[in-house]
């Protein structure tokens, strides 16, 4: 199983190496969760850049990436970008998407 994607132009090799190693070590049913760090208010930029790398690289044929913006009630000024990457051959892909949708809804729903 060749899971190490090759970086495209202007893409850091380290990102692709980390993702490839994760799936090589954990198997095709593994999931990589991600959260764009909001500590310096550059989370949106990180999300855009990472999404562009994913789209422009050779990820999309073998991997699925889903993400969303989440605003948490305690601090509506801070936007969080969360998501996952999974191999398209993951036998639990449909269930994973259902769980991600449920989790995302829970994150953005008002809490009492």
Image: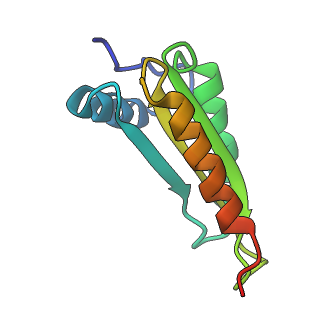
Q: Compared with residue 64, is residue 81 higher up or lower down, i.e. above or below? A: below
Q: Nearer the viewer, residue 32 or 103?
A: 103
Q: Nearer the viewer, residue 63 or 55?
A: 63
Q: Nearer the viewer, residue 94 or 58?
A: 94
Residue 91: x and y, percent?
Answer: 42, 23
Left or right placement of residue 92 versus residue 9 in this view: left
Q: Residue at x 56, y 47 (%)?
A: 99
The quarter of the displayed image where residue 57 is located: top right
Left or right placement of residue 71 versus residue 107 in this view: right
Left or right placement of residue 45 versus residue 2 in this view: right
The quarter of the displayed image where residue 73 is located: bottom right
Residue 90: x and y, percent?
Answer: 42, 24
User: Can residue 50 be seen from the camera position used here?
Assistant: no
Q: Nearer the viewer, residue 63 or 101?
A: 101
Q: Residue at x 72, y 56 (%)?
A: 69
Q: How is the image coloured?
A: rainbow
Q: Residue at x 61, y 68 (%)?
A: 38
Q: Compared with residue 79, is residue 24 higher up or lower down, i.e. above or below? A: above
Residue 71: x and y, percent?
Answer: 74, 69
Left or right placement of residue 74 versus residue 4 in this view: right
User: Can residue 47 be seen from the camera position used here?
Assistant: yes
């Amino acid at each position: 199983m060749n899971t190490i994607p090759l970086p495209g132009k202007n893409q850091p090799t380290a990102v692709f190496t980390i993702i490839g190693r994760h799936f090589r070590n954990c198997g095709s049913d593994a999931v990589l969760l991600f959260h764009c760090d909001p500590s310096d208010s550059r989370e949106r930029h990180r999300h855009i850049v990472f999404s562009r790398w994913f789209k422009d690289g050779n990820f999309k044929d073998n991997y699925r990436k889903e993400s969303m913006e989440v605003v948490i009630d305690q601090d509506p000024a801070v936007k969080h970008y969360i998501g996952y990457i999974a191999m398209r051959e993951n036998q639990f892909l449909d269930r994973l998407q259902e769980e991600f949708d449920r989790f995302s809804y829970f994150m953005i729903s008002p809490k009492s």
